[in-house]
């Protein structure tokens, strides 16, 4: 063998560089021991066995609901049939009657008429009460009244309020025309009543105008 050689690679793939000294006869055993120690050949490291890896199941994708970009058309409403209705007067209007109310003008010359609605029942009493309310004042007020019709004659009994400062006989001619004349003109002008004359009393006797 030569003076020096490079050590060859071991069969396990690890390479060691060894310088061989001159071999003398009879020292084979020592050479072998020195060769093993000098070359520093190490036993091969065991190759680690990879541990089995458990396959992780990939989560299944949740189903995706596709949103519609255009809304579904709504059904058009069916037009309801048109029903023609006849307008009928209310029961209150049917139970009323129209009466022409006469009142004296501001110059005490003429009576002016105005149409008003009154209940069909007890129309005569309602008309007299409406005229009396318009005639009341601070010093002259009628507290109560009563109406009685006998044929073509209507008698109206009037009672003044206890605190009234004036009486019927203290009225001027214009005030008497406005108070008594308006009632007489209204009652005799309504044809259904067929009244021709109106009398007034104060609870005791007839009021003479």
Image (spheres, grey):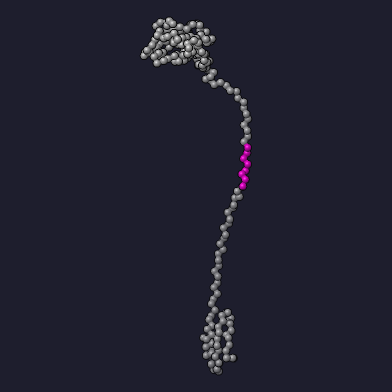
* Residue reaching furthest to the bottom: 25
**Where residue 206 sits in the image (x, y, percent)?**
42, 5
Which quarter of the rendering shows the N terminus? bottom right
Whether residue 187 is visible, yes or no, is: no
Vertical arrangement, residue 199 with respect to residue 83, above or below: above
Q: Is residue 66 a member of the stretch shown in magenta?
A: no
**Where residue 41 sits in the image (x, y, percent)?**
54, 83
Whether residue 20 is visible, yes or no, is: yes
Q: Is residue 73 a member of the stretch shown in magenta?
A: yes
Vertical arrangement, residue 15 with respect to residue 143, above or below: below
Query: Based on the displayed image, in which of its 4 quarters is residue 2 positioned?
Result: bottom right
Instruction: Please give the name of the residue rendered at 55% of the width and 86% of the height, measured from the top-left corner.
Output: 18
Vertical arrangement, residue 16 with respect to residue 189, above or below: below
Instruction: Please give the name of the residue rendered at 46% of the width and 9% of the height, measured from the top-left corner.
Output: 177
**Where residue 25 sits in the image (x, y, percent)?**
55, 94
Looking at this view, is 49 or 154 the one in front? 154
Instruction: Please give the name of the residue rendered at 51% of the width and 17% of the height, measured from the top-left corner.
Output: 117
* Residue reaching furthest to the left: 163
Which quarter of the rendering shows the C terminus? top left
Looking at this view, is 185 or 127 the one in front? 185
Instruction: Please give the name of the residue rendered at 53% of the width and 77% of the height, measured from the top-left corner.
Output: 45
Magenta stretch secondary structure, dominant = loop
**Where residue 17 sits in the image (x, y, percent)?**
55, 84
Vertical arrangement, residue 20 with respect to residue 52, above or below: below
Query: Based on the displayed image, in which of its 4 quarters is residue 133 positioned?
Result: top left
| Count of numbered circles in the view | 0
Query: Start and end of the magenta stretch?
Result: 69-76
């Amino acid at each position: 063998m030569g003076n020096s050689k490079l050590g060859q690679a071991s069969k396990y793939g690890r390479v060691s560089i060894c310088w061989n000294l001159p071999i003398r006869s009879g020292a084979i055993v020592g050479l072998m021991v020195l060769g093993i120690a000098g070359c520093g050949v190490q036993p091969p490291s065991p190759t680690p066995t990879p541990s089995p890896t458990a396959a992780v199941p990939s989560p299944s994708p949740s189903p995706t609901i596709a949103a519609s970009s255009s809304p579904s058309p709504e059904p058009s409403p069916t037009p309801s049939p048109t029903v023609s209705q006849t307008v009928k007067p209310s029961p209150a209007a049917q139970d009323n009657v129209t009466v022409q109310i006469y009142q004296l003008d501001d110059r005490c010359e003429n009576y002016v008429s105005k149409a008003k609605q009154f209940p069909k029942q007890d129309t005569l009493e309602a008309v007299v009460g409406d005229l009396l309310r318009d005639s009341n004042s601070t010093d002259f007020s009628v507290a109560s009244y009563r109406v009685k019709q006998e044929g073509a004659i209507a008698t109206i009994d009037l009672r003044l309020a206890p605190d009234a400062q004036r009486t019927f006989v203290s009225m001027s001619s214009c005030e008497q025309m406005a108070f008594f004349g308006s009632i007489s003109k209204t009652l005799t002008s309504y044809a259904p009543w067929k009244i021709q004359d109106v009398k007034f009393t104060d609870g005791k006797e007839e009021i003479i105008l």
